[in-house]
Amino acid sequence: MTQKYYKKLESTEMKKFLDELDTIETCLDRVSGPCELKVYNKKEICSVLGVNEKQLKDFRFKGKLSYTKVGDKYWYTQDDIDEFMAKHHRKAFA
């Protein structure tokens, strides 16, 4: 397929993704009032988790960290982070 097709496809997928985020935000507003859904890119999520890009890729590959993929971009929500942290939480034993 041509590069022009891929750019159009990425644009279409990104629009779908952003439309889904708007729908989620609208539903949350109805239930609990205004709510802002934070979406992190690769650089931001690495900073939040304190990992490098290779470790982040490993987390995705092994199914340890949930994500949304649009075209060749990966996006992460606060829920993805919370789920990841809960899975790796260890109780204090002392």
Image: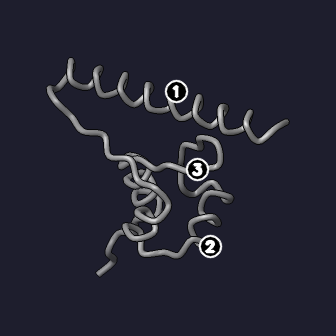
Picture layout, residue 13 above or below residue 38: above
Amino acid on which the number 2 mark rests in the picture: Lys
Q: Of the residues tagged 1 and 2, which is closer to the observer?
A: 1
Picture layout, residue 83 above or below residue 91: above
Identity of the residue furthest to the bottom in this view: 94
Identity of the residue furthest to the right in this view: 1
Task: Name the quadrant containing residue 49.
Answer: bottom left
In the picture, measured across the screen, residue 11 lies left or right of residue 36, that is right
Q: Position of residue 7 (x, y in %)?
A: 66, 38
Picture layout, residue 52 above or below residue 20: below
- Residue tagged 1: 16
Picture layout, residue 75 above or below residue 53: above
Q: Which residue is at 49% across, 49% downward?
A: 75
Give the number of the disc on residue 73: 3
Q: Which of marks 3 and 2 is nearer the N terminus?
A: 2
Count residues near mark 1 (Cα–Cα under 10 Å), then give few for <14, some for 14-19, many for 20+: few
Q: Where is residue 58 in the image (x, y as percent from the top left)?
A: 64, 66
Task: Name the quadrant containing residue 92.
Answer: bottom left
- The local secondary structure at tag 1 comes to helix
Identity of the residue furthest to the front in this view: 4
- Which quadrant of the rendered structure holds the C terminus? bottom left
Instruction: Decide which of 67, 44 is in the foreground and name it.
Output: 44
Amino acid on which the number 3 mark rests in the picture: Lys
Q: Earlier in the sequence, mark 3 or mark 1?
A: 1
- The local secondary structure at tag 3 comes to strand
Q: Which residue is at 44% across, 26% downward?
A: 20
- The local secondary structure at tag 2 comes to helix
- Give the spatial CA distance, label 1 vs label 2: 28 Å
Amino acid on which the number 1 mark rests in the picture: Lys
Instruction: Decide which of 53, 78 is in the foreground and name it.
Output: 53
Q: Position of residue 22 (x, y in %)?
A: 35, 26
